[in-house]
Every structure is written in C-alpha cells, then in structure tokens.
Amino acid sequence: MEQKWWHKSVVYQIYPRSFMDSNGDGIGDIQGIISKLDYLEKLGIDVIWLSPVYQSPMDDNGYDISDYQDIAKEFGTMADMDELLEEAGTRGIKIIMDLVVNHSSDEHKWFLEAKKSVDNHYRDYYIWREGKRDEDGNRIPPKDLGSAFGGSTWEYDETTDMYYFHIFSKKQPDLNWENETLRQEIYDMMNWWLEKGIGGFRMDVIDLIGKEVDKGIKENGPRLHDLIKEMHESSFGNYDVLTVGETWGASPASATRYSDPDRKELSMIFQFEHMVLDWHSVHGKWKPVGLDFIRLKRVMSKWQTDLTKGWNSLFWNNHDLPRIVSRWGNDGDHRETSAKMFAILLHMMKGTPYIYQGEEIGMTNVKFSRLEDYNDIEIHGTYKDKVLRDEELTHEEFMRGVYQNGRDNARTPMQWNNQEHAGFTTGNPWLQVNENYEQINVKEALCDKRSIFYTYQKLIELRKNSKYSDTIIYGDYTLLYRNHPEVFAYTRADENYKLLVVANFTDTFSEIVIPDEFINGSEIVISTDKELSVRESIRLDPYESFVLGLEIT
Ligand code: NOJ
C-alpha cells in the first residue's frame, strides 16, 4: 500500500463551542483554540478536525450552515480562521474542516431564494414535493422517511404550497445532489477552502447524499459512489489531503469502496458498527441495552482484518457520542485506569486514531436533573416524539437514555483548571460545566506524570516516533482469546517486531496466559501498571492493560 501522511497521524477533534472561550461570551471561539495550540502540540497530535465554525443560526450548533465561506460571529472572523491555520501550521498541525453538504441551513441564501417560487434559479437545489391528498381532499405530506431529530422529514411551505425534505431538523433542508449546478457550487467552495491550505475534510453524513426520496432510500443510494468520485475529481483529488466520511451504515465491503485508493474516493470513513452494539433495536440510543463484550471484540476485529484495501479510522468518542469512560468503563473508582485501557486498546490498532476533546483527561458523562438544562436539538426533538406524542418511553426512561447516550455528554465545556467554569470562560457557559471539574481538568493532568494525558502522549509518540511505528501503523492484526469474557487481547506484527496488547475490559480481576514467545525477551512498551512483571500467567487488576514488544530475530 502506498504510504500516506495521514496513515501515521493522530487527529484531535475540537467542538469549538465547548473548547475555549476567549472573549467571555460563554461560547468557545477560534481565538480560544489558538490559545490552546501549545497544549495540543504537547499532546503530540498532528491534525485537528474542527467541527463547523461557519456562519450558522446554530439550530444544530453549526451543523446548519448559512454561509460556507464565512465564520459565525460567536466563533470569530475569517481573519481568526486564517490565523488559526497559520498558527497550527507553524506547530506542524493541519486543520480538517467539517463539510456539511447533505443539507444547508434554511437561512442559507440558496434556500431563501428557493422558497420564493417554483421557478426560482435555486429551487432545484433542494428537494420539493407536492404531497398527497387525503380522503377529504386536504393536502398531506409525502411518505415520511423518519427525521433524525423527531417529527416528519417533510415540512410544508406555504408560499409555493409544497413540502421540502429534511432528514435532520426543519431548519436543515436537504440539498438536492441530482442538481449539477449545486454540485459545482459545492466543489468550488471546497476548492476555495483547499486553496487556503486546509488539511482536508470530515464529511458529515456523506452516505446520505445519494438519497432517492421517492423510493424511500436515504443511506447508500445507488448514485452515492459516483457522486463521491466526482467530488474527488473536482476538488480534493487534486490536493494531498485527508478526507474522512461519516457513514453510519457502512460495512467493511462498503468501506473498501470508499477508501480503496484505486477507486479515488475518500481516505477513510468513520464506521459505527462497534458504537451501536448497546443500542436498543427499536429505541436506539434512548434505551441502552447491555454491551455484549464478545461481540464487541468480534466487530472491532472484523474491521481490523477485513478492510485490506482501504483504511480504518479508530475512535471511541465524538461530539455525538457519550464519553467512553462513562459508557463502557468506570467513571468512579477506576476512571483513570479504565480511560487508559481504552486509549491503549484503540491506539495500538491499525488505522488513524481520533481523540475527542477531553478524552485525553478522562472527562465523563454529565447528569443534569432537568430536561431544560440540556441544549441538544436531538434530545428535545426525540423527547417530543417518544415521550410526549407516542408515549413509548416514560420521562424517567428517556432521561436514563439521555444520561447514558445523549450528545450533550460530550459537549459540556472543556475542563481546563479548577477555577470557576473550569477555566473555559469568564462569562456564563452556554452549557453547564460538569461538576467534577475540580478533580478532572487539564491543569491537574499536566502536573501528574501518571495521568491519562501522558498515556495518550506516549501512545502518540509510539505511533509516530518509535521503533514500533511501522508495526503499529501497518502490522498485521490477530485477535487472541476471542471468547475470554474479560480480556481483549491481540497482536500486531510485521517482519521486525511483534506487539502483544492485553486489556482487562472489566472492573473485576482477571487472568491471562501470556503466549510463550513473549515470556522471555519482550519489553513492556506501555502499561497502566508500573509494577508489571511478565510471567506465564498474569493476574490483571480491574482495567489493567499493557503492551509487550518483541524483536523478531
Ligand atoms: C452528523 C453530525 O455529527 C451531527 O452532530 C449532526 O447533528 C448531523 N450530522 C447533522 O448534520
């Protein structure tokens, strides 16, 4: 496989609203990010995925863009953005922009125009249908395809007496990718950003752009890959950049279609198969079920071994997911060790690792007692459907879902120190700070050489600058002890080195037999426990994890 710079990169995701506020308005901003670049450099990451900072009415906190070539006032100005690119660049950090082109905001000029009349130049940039008539002759919407934030996918618009389609909120109308002029405008916009020197794009729900609404197809439409190929050819294919597509419905086979370099589509995708294992079959994230650990091992290993002509992304967290240490770890007594376990387990795998802000200090889920304290549009929209309208879940059941899986778990302000509002802002934070900030914060983490932060720092260093780098990046993956009920263990190997990764995934003691070849002559590469001594059989403390390295002679 031809080597690419992003094969050995580690990406850090910033959710700008919650990262660092420089001007006291309670909302994170670009100058805030600039002020923390030295911190990110110290961590060792070399790419930032910047969640949207474009102009937006913020119905979905920026995933509803009203101008792709301007910056939201609360985040700063285009001059700030240029400064960020420059300042990051001098530290060897590239910025990848969030590209949200499945939909725009309803306040984008295209939509404001499109609404005016059926023959407006921009009308066909969006998806309009007349709807149907019921028995009494009243107009009713076309078939509802299920909106992600509750309610129907069709919104009635009085001016032209028609409905427009939206998979997300009604303020996020879907763009019509069948329209060639629209596509060209999008490619021009992408090229404008690429010319600024960005490091690539994270592509929001890209598997939805090939939708065929009349056939009921949202994901993975028949034209999807042709569209991505066209996008590649018309924009980022001409630059040496990282592109990562968000694809909830991907399999290793479809991931190969996206990321096989010969097909000229994307660098890699985010797949979510491991992230939905504890979701309910009907109520999804809102009614979590227990995690089947053996299945988790199987799924994660499948992605490691089956994606041979293509590239993986590796992640536990993002701005839409709960904090992993609370979700599948232990955010009480074993917070530090379980957070390190997740880090070691993931960062030794094959693919490009993504760290979500705060993950590197073990930030946890949050529990607000009142629904009103939550900001997320998804939480409120789903509450209306599932609790108020359909009475499928009680208030208490729904809140349990929110505590476990709600998106605001990831969005509470970054905890920088033990001062008021965790040092995030001098004003009133837009979302409450997690009350554990006095114990869990960056300042504390940096002072303690044994903190989670330094585990991440070391893992990044091992991947980028160690004798094991090639093995970590390109080595073969083999799952061990697939039916062990507590331990996730695997090897990575190439012709020079072999690594054994062992992680106790539970809060009980466990035991593991060390393969013979590692008993003599291997070294401890990284561990959660300094006292580890390598023997035939090792008793593992709760969440204890380690990596052994062996030179192949
Ligand atoms: C996926 C994004 O990650 C999420 O935050 C957003 O709400 C939807 N796409 C809609 O853009």
Image (cartoon, rainbow, N blue to C red):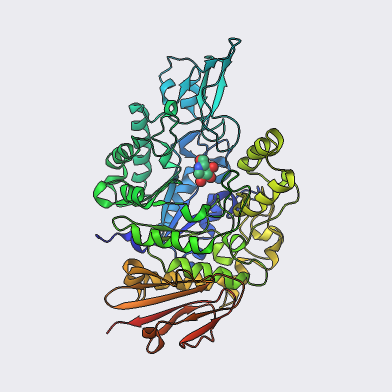
Which residue occupies the extreme right position in the image? 369
Quarter holding the N terminus is bottom left
Left or right of 210: which side holds 284?
A: right
Residue 199 horizontal/vertical position (percent): 37, 52
Up/down of 54 relative to 468, above or below: above
| Quarter of the image with the C terminus in it | bottom left
In this rendered view, identify the residue nearer to me: 421 or 81. 421
Would you identify the image quadrant in which residue 394 lies?
Answer: top right
Compared with 280, 518 (above or below) is: below
Say how many tags the image has. 0
Nearer the observer, 465 or 126? 126
Q: Nearer the viewer, residue 417 or 61?
A: 61
Residue furthest to the front in view is 483
The outermost residue toward the top is: 137
**Residue 207 seen from this side:** yes
Is residue 467 visible from the viewing direction of this image?
no
Q: Quadrant of residue 32?
A: bottom right
Name the spot of residue 138 as percent of width and height, x first. Answer: 59, 12
- Using the image, determine if residue 300 lies above or below residue 460: above
Left-right relation of 103 to 390: left
Q: Kindly identify the residue that appears in the image at 31 percent across and 55 percent down.
A: 310
Residue 550, given in percent of the width and then of the height, sits at 35, 82
The image shows residue 400 at horizontal and vertical percentages of 69, 51
